Image (cartoon, rainbow, N blue to C red):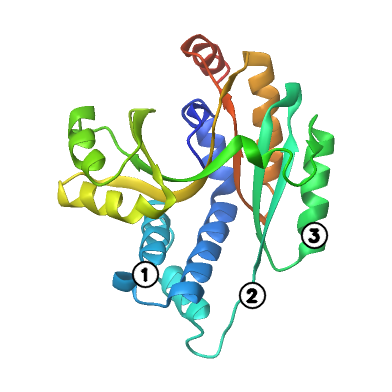
Amino acid sequence: MAGHSKWATTKHKKAVIDSRRAKSWAKLIKNIEVAAKLGGADLAGNPTLYDAVLKAKKTSVPKDNIDRAIKRGAGIGGEAVEYTSIMYEGYGPNGVALMIECLTDNKNRAAAEVRTALSRNGGTLADPGSVAYNFSRKGVVVVGGEGTTEDDVMMAALEAGAEEIEAHGEGFQVITEATDLVPVRSALVDAGIEYDSADIEFVPNLKVEIDADTARKIFRLIDALEDSEDVQNVFSNFDLTPEVQAELEEDE
């Protein structure tokens, strides 16, 4: 799941990495193609493409695949790509809110796969707007924790317009207005702070704490949604207490 939920640190990591690498690569490639189509093939002049390529490299996508994706997206060499962005809203077990971001070349397939994943895993599709008001479009920069302190991140990011800095796994997460994502990202780099990812995401305005049983159900639902090649990101409003995280870690 993309986004800022702490559950990413408790997920059954090895199985996910092994079984989903191909699908993960396909989604990262799709992001590169779209970024190149919208802003051109020059990484220096296209920060969205720069971040999409950085994320792909960190996930070990081969350089040749990345280069071909940039060319396809930019229309270099005659190849062209055409994707439609669709946002579905839904509810998971116990009313947990979900925003499901799709990027697809087949709207009917995307809709069917999202509906199937929800219905088979205790979720429901919601009317447009009934969930979205719970979320704000924000910039999210994830910073690795090795050799970096919270004070380091605060000094660099707050001056550039960051709104909030919070713990994220072993590192930190910097929240910004969507329009401030690039300046904040650049400020971190200028301060010698490496970042793992920089994306525009749907951040919940109010998080709801859930118990371990509900968390397990939500994870299964999100796993099912992410199995679709058309689902790029799933955002949710749940939060996990340290006690619940510890209980979930015992499941691994």
* Residue 7 percent location from the top left of the image: 52, 27
Choose between 223 and 2: the one closer to the eye: 2
Q: Are marks 2 and 3 in contact (CB under 8 Å)?
A: no
Q: Amino acid at mark 1?
A: Asn
Query: Is residue 1 visible in the rendered structure shown here?
Result: no
Q: Residues within 10 Å of mark 1 (few under 14, many from 20)?
A: some
* Residue 57 percent location from the top left of the image: 37, 57
Residue most extreme to the bottom: 78
* Residue 182 percent location from the top left of the image: 33, 56
Q: Which residue is mark 2?
A: 82
Query: Is residue 122 visible in the rendered structure shown here?
Result: yes
For residue 46, the mark is 1
Q: Amino acid at mark 3?
A: Arg
Question: Can you tell which quarter of the image residue 159 is in?
Answer: top left
Q: Which residue is mark 3?
A: 109
Q: Amino acid at mark 2?
A: Glu
Tag 1's secondary structure? loop
Residue at horizontal 47%, vertical 13%? Answer: 242
Whichever of callouts 1 and 2 sits on the residue coming sooner in the sequence is 1
With 187 as the anchor, is 169 left or right in this view? right
